[in-house]
Image: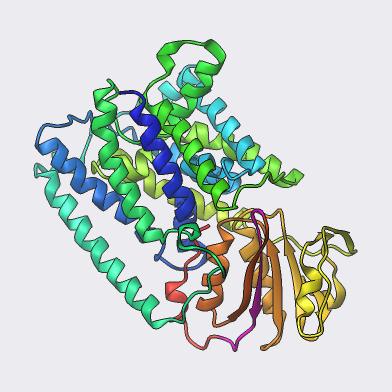
C-alpha cells in the first residue's frame, strides 16, 4: 500500500505544476493586489476536502487523530513559515514542484527546509520545539468545542466558496479575454486555478484512506515527509520510509514529467541574492512548519478541513507572515547605471517589429537611459529583460516599467518564470493593457509584448486581479 503514495503524489505533482498552484501567491495577492480571487482556489481545496473527510469520518472509513492547540508554537511557527515562503519563492509543495521545473533556488530552499525540519523534529532543535509546544490548551476542533457536527462547518464553507467562485467567474466573463500562448495544443495549456484547486481537494480526500491503509493515520502532508526523506538519506533507517515520503517523491516525479513534456523544464541558476534568500527561506520554513504542526498543506489544507483550532490559527499567521515579508522583500530591483549585454542567438530586427531584436538577448545590467527601467528599442518599443528572475519579480518589474511609458507604447518582456505565463497576461487585462504578442522563445522561456492602455479610471477592474505566481 505504501506505493499508492507515489501514485497520488505523482498526480498531485502534475496538477500543481500545470495549475501553477501555490498558496504563497494566493495569500500574497490579498496584500499586494487587494484581490481575493486566487485565494478562492484554496477555499475550493478546503471545501472539497472538508466534505470528503466528513463523509469518510462519519461512515467510519477513517478515524482522524485531532491535533491539540498549542497557541505559542502555532502563532510563532505560522508567522515564521509565512516569512520563509516569501523568501524561498514558494510554499512547501510549491518548492517541491518548482524544484522539478529546474529552479536551482528551489533546490536550495528544499534542502534547507528538509534540514531545519529534521533538526526540529529529532535533531538539535527538538528540545526547543518541545518547549514551544509545552503551552497546550487541549483544544482540538471547532465542532468539538461547539458540540455540533462537522457537517455544519463543511456545508457552510462550501456555500461561501460557491458564492465566491460564481462572483469571480461573473467578473471574468465581463472582462476582456486573457491572452494565451499561441500555437499550443490543448494538453500543453495550463489548468485553470479553480480546476486545479478542485483536483487537489479531491486528491486530499483520496489520500487519507490510502495512507491509513499503510499504517499512517494522516492525509496529505509535506513537512514531516520532507524531514523523513533527509533522515533516511543520512541514517538508512527504513522506519523513515512511509506513505508520506512516497507522496513527496511522487510529487517531484509527477511535476518533472509535466514540466518536461510541456517544455517548461530548464535548469535555472539563481543570482547570489536569490540563493541567500533561498537558504534563509528554507530554514524558516522548516522551523516554522515544525512549530505550527504543518505547512500550507498540513495546516492550510488538511487541518483547516478538519476545522481544528491549529489549522485555522496557523493559516491566519502564515498570512500575516506573508504580508510582512511581501512588504519588506518584494520590491523590483533598481536599474543599474551601466549597460552590459550578452547575446544568445539574437534574432534580427525588422521594420515592423523592433522587438525582434530583443529575442534571446539577456541583459546583465539594465540601462538607465532616460531613467527608465526598460531599454529603448525605437518606434515606441521598450525591452525589459526578466530572464532569471523568480516570481513575482517579472510581474513587479513589468508594472514598474510600463508605468514609465506613454499610452500606446509597447513593453517587450523576456522571462523564464513559469508562473509568469499566467500572471503577466492577467495583469495586462486587469490594468487595461493589450497583449499584442505572446510566444515561446525556447525551453522554459517566453516573450510577451504589451501595449500600454489608458489609465484605469476606477478600481473595479482591479478587484478581480489574478496574481498567483
Task: Tell me residue 301's x, y (percent).
Answer: 33, 44
Task: Tell me residue 30's x, y (percent).
Answer: 45, 62
Task: Tell me residue 78's x, y (percent).
Answer: 43, 41
Residue at left 35%, top 71%? 168
Task: Tell me residue 134's x, y (percent).
Answer: 36, 24
Nearer to the camera, 327 or 295: 295
Say above or below: 455 vs 335.
Answer: below
Nearer to the camera, 132 or 45: 45
447 part of magenta stretch:
yes
Say above or below: 286 vs 277.
Answer: above
The N terminus - image quarter = top left
Q: Which residues are magenta?
A: 443-455
Residue at left 45%, top 43%? 13
Residue at left 47%, top 10%? 237
Nearer to the camera, 448 or 158: 448
Left or right of residue 6, residue 81 in this image = right
Say above or below: 428 vs 346.
Answer: below
Say above or below: 160 vs 245.
Answer: below
Residue 170 seen anywhere in this rendered image of the structure: yes
Residue at left 64%, top 77%? 450
Amino acid at each position: 500500500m505504501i506505493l499508492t503514495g507515489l501514485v497520488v503524489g505523482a498526480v498531485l505533482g502534475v496538477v500543481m505544476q500545470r495549475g501553477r498552484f501555490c498558496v504563497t501567491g494566493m495569500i500574497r495577492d490579498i496584500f499586494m493586489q487587494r484581490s481575493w480571487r486566487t485565494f478562492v482556489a484554496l477555499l475550493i481545496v478546503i471545501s472539497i476536502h472538508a466534505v470528503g473527510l466528513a463523509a469518510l469520518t462519519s461512515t467510519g472509513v477513517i478515524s482522524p487523530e485531532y491535533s491539540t492547540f498549542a497557541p505559542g508554537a502555532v502563532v510563532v511557527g505560522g508567522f515564521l513559515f509565512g516569512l520563509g515562503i516569501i523568501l524561498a519563492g514558494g510554499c512547501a509543495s510549491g518548492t517541491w514542484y518548482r524544484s522539478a521545473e529546474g529552479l536551482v533556488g528551489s533546490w536550495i530552499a528544499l534542502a534547507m527546509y528538509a534540514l531545519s525540519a529534521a533538526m526540529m523534529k529529532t535533531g538539535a532543535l527538538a528540545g526547543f520545539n518541545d518547549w514551544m509546544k509545552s503551552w497546550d490548551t487541549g483544544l482540538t476542533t471547532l465542532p468539538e468545542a461547539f458540540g455540533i457536527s462537522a457537517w455544519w462547518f463543511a456545508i457552510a464553507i462550501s456555500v461561501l466558496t460557491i458564492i465566491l467562485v460564481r462572483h469571480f467567474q461573473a467578473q471574468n466573463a465581463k472582462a476582456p479575454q486573457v491572452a494565451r500562448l499561441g500555437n499550443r495544443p490543448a494538453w500543453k495549456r495550463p489548468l485553470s486555478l479553480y480546476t486545479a484547486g478542485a483536483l487537489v481537494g479531491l486528491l486530499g480526500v483520496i489520500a487519507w484512506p490510502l495512507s491509513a491503509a499503510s499504517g499512517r493515520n494522516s492525509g496529505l502532508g509535506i513537512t514531516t515527509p520532507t524531514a523523513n526523506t533527509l533522515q533516511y538519506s543520512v541514517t538508512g533507517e527504513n522506519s523513515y520510509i512511509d506513505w508520506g515520503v512516497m507522496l513527496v517523491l511522487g510529487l517531484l516525479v509527477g511535476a518533472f514529467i509535466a514540466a518536461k513534456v510541456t517544455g517548461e523544464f530548464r535548469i535555472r541558476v539563481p543570482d547570489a541574492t536569490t540563493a541567500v534568500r533561498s537558504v534563509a527561506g528554507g530554514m524558516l520554513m522548516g522551523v516554522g512548519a515544525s512549530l505550527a504542526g504543518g505547512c500550507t498543506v498540513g495546516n492550510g489544507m488538511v487541518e483547516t478541513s478538519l476545522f481544528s483550532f491549529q489549522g485555522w490559527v496557523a493559516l491566519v499567521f502564515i498570512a500575516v507572515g506573508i504580508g510582512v515579508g511581501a512588504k519588506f522583500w518584494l520590491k523590483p530591483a533598481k536599474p543599474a547605471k551601466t549597460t552590459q549585454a550578452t547575446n544568445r542567438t539574437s534574432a534580427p530586427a525588422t521594420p515592423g517589429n523592433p522587438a525582434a531584436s530583443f529575442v534571446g538577448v539577456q541583459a546583465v545590467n539594465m540601462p538607465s537611459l532616460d531613467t527608465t527601467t526598460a531599454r529603448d528599442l525605437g518606434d515606441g518599443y521598450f525591452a525589459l529583460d526578466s530572464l532569471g528572475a523568480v516570481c513575482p519579480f517579472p510581474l513587479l518589474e513589468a508594472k514598474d516599467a510600463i508605468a514609465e511609458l506613454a499610452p500606446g507604447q509597447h513593453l517587450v518582456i523576456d522571462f523564464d518564470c513559469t508562473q509568469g505565463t499566467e500572471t503577466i497576461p492577467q495583469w495586462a487585462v486587469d490594468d487595461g493593457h493589450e497583449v499584442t504578442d505572446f510566444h515561446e522563445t525556447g525551453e522554459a522561456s517566453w516573450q510577451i509584448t504589451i501595449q500600454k492602455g489608458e489609465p484605469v479610471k476606477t478600481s473595479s477592474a482591479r478587484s478581480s486581479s489574478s496574481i498567483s505566481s
